[in-house]
Image (cartoon, grey):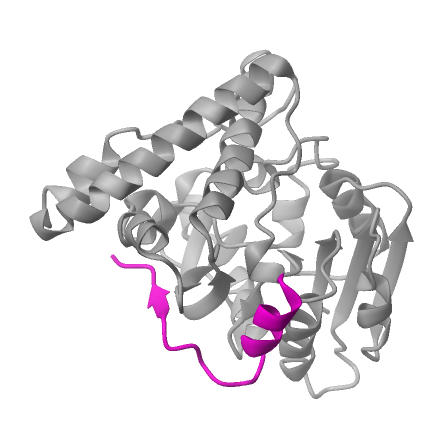
Amino acid sequence: MTSVVIAAYNEEAVIGRCLDALLADAPPDPLDPLDITVVANGCTDATAAVARERAGVRVLDLPGAGKAAALNAGDATAVGFPRVYLDADVVLSPGALRAFGAALDRSVDGRGGDPPLAVVPGRSLDLTGRPTPVRAYYAINSRLPAFRHSLFGRGAIALSAAGRARFDTFPAMTADDLFLDGLFAPYEKRELDGVLARLATPRRTGDLVRRLVRVRAGNAELRAAAARGAVATVAVRRTARSSWLRDVVLPRPWLAPAAACYVGITLVAALRAQRELRAGSGGWGRDESSREPALADAESDGQPPSGLVKHSR
């Protein structure tokens, strides 16, 4: 039985499409049901109510906001494997859950011939109607090699029972995907071909910067905790600061104008993240633009967006 855990904070505009995609992909065999747990944490909107409208979805409603606590509560309730951790604004492609299960059960080429312990979908970035700076940023970001061999940056991670046994609970930090990535050696994790997570990119440049500030601050917090031994991992991935130039722009010089936007946005986000860390003021810094109800409804009409960009290899 596949179990899906979704931590959701004020996601009423998007969680419906996430759940509908999962339920449409549920196994037809009643002896192998899909186990879905939505953990609404500190919500002030109708997230829990929207989730309860879907038959077969278990809903936990926690009074306080906090993704780590929500993931841990969902984990304690989930009953099966593979265990899929899914962001509420992510839509998985048809067949994704079956592909996760098959990959984690099947022996693949690797050290010792063992199956992977963690698998992820590829990224499908929705850039429909986004402004030029956002499109330029993702023209570089979508080609970074770090995403090919990692678990982060796609809002969906599936673990086998052996993979889940690598840790006790999620630490009280925001970088949950980087935490999971650091638990596994390269040969123990895999991106699946033909399986995609549709990610809604920010609709405004300011929202992109806020999202990056949160990511950078969370990653820095996790790396500092790992360095002092407060978090047990195999190795938290280090930042490849020049990869955008070495691996993306130099082989493709026509991307130089996009790189200028990428570097500028990245530097602004890095400076703001450092300032927030020093001040201890960090906040969630979530991108709200892709969750605005009218826009979310337009992106849930069942038609593929015209601006989807798959991760480029």
| Residue sitting at x 47%, y 58% | 203
Q: Is residue 130 left or right of residue 44?
A: left
Q: Is residue 177 magenta?
A: no
Q: Is residue 68 left or right of residue 124?
A: right
Look at 71% across and 37% down and name the residue there: 170
For this rendering, which residue is in front, 282 or 38? Answer: 282
Q: Quadrant of residue 59?
A: bottom right
Question: For the C terminus, which image quadrant?
Answer: bottom left
Residue nearest the observer in this picture, 58 or 1: 58
Q: Quadrant of residue 155?
A: bottom right
For the residue pair 196 and 250, the one nearer the viewer reads as 250
Magenta region includes residue 296: yes
Q: Position of residue 25 (x, y in %)?
A: 62, 80
Q: Is residue 290 left or right of residue 187?
A: right
Q: Residue furthest bottom?
A: 28
> In the rendered image, which quarter is residue 256 located in?
top left
Horizontal and vertical percent for residue 7? 73, 52
Q: Which residues are magenta?
A: 292-313
Q: Tell me, yes or no, if residue 156 can be seen here.
A: no
Q: Residue at the spot x=65%, y=83% of the render?
A: 24
**Residue 189 percent location from the top left of the image:** 46, 49
Q: How many marks?
A: 0
Q: Is residue 190 above or below residue 56?
A: above
